[in-house]
Amino acid sequence: MSQNTLRQQFQLRDTQKAAYEILQARIDLGGSSGTICIVGDFLSGKTSLVKQFLADRFEHPEYYYLNVNLYLLEQLKKEEDLSNLILTKAKTRLIMQVTLEEAIRKHFENYDLLVLDAIEIIYPYNLNLITITNKYARDGKICIICVPENRERGFVCDFSWGMCEIIRLDV
């Protein structure tokens, strides 16, 4: 992600400001670790919220941000026989899981905070991101996941919700 995109200022709506303050308080408590999920409908402002949060905290916010959709698509394109992945859901799921685990592990070797955004690609594969992130978001390390949810349309991620803190971004 380019630095310009993450350094821009966003005009946060009241619901975003409230969620931002909760997120900021949670991070600033110190000594905290684990996974925080920002949950909201599509286009509710989850991405703007986390990008503003990162821009306010870090000189290089792009170091702390991972667009999961783009990252996994890039990694899957590297597979020798991409056509077989379409036919083999289990293999694709495993590649996604291993790829994400490796990216998260490597990130937390150097940084204490990571934002995972644009996670829709994992939805059909029932990949439990919270279980994955909690392996690495320990000892003062925090992972923030932007989770799209629209119950009316049946788009609800099946995560281990009891293993994270949830901040709801209601429009």
Image: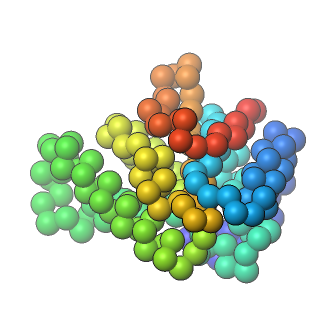
Q: Quadrant of residue 95?
A: bottom left
Q: Nearer the viewer, residue 21 or 66?
A: 21
Residue found at the far right of this picture: 14
The residue sitting at 83% across, 50% down in the picture is 21
Q: Quadrant of residue 101?
A: bottom left
Give the image location of residue 132, x and y in percent.
Answer: 41, 52
Q: Answer with left or right where residue 11 lies relative to residue 163.
A: right
Q: Count up the numbered dots.
A: 0
Q: Nearer the viewer, residue 153 or 26?
A: 26
Q: Nearer the viewer, residue 166 or 81?
A: 166
State the scheme by which the image is colored.
Answer: rainbow
The residue sitting at 38% across, 60% down in the picture is 100
The residue sitting at 35% across, 38% down in the picture is 126
Q: Quadrant of the N terminus?
A: bottom right
Give the image location of residue 2, x and y in percent.
Answer: 59, 75
Give the image location of residue 66, x and y in percent.
Answer: 52, 64
Using the image, determine if residue 63 lies above or below residue 35: below
Quick check: can you spot residue 4?
no
Q: Answer with left or right where residue 103 lies relative to residue 92.
A: right
Q: Answer with left or right where residue 159 lies relative to residue 50.
A: left
Give the image location of residue 75, x and y in percent.
Answer: 31, 65
Quick check: can you spot residue 77?
yes
The residue sitting at 75% across, 33% down in the picture is 171
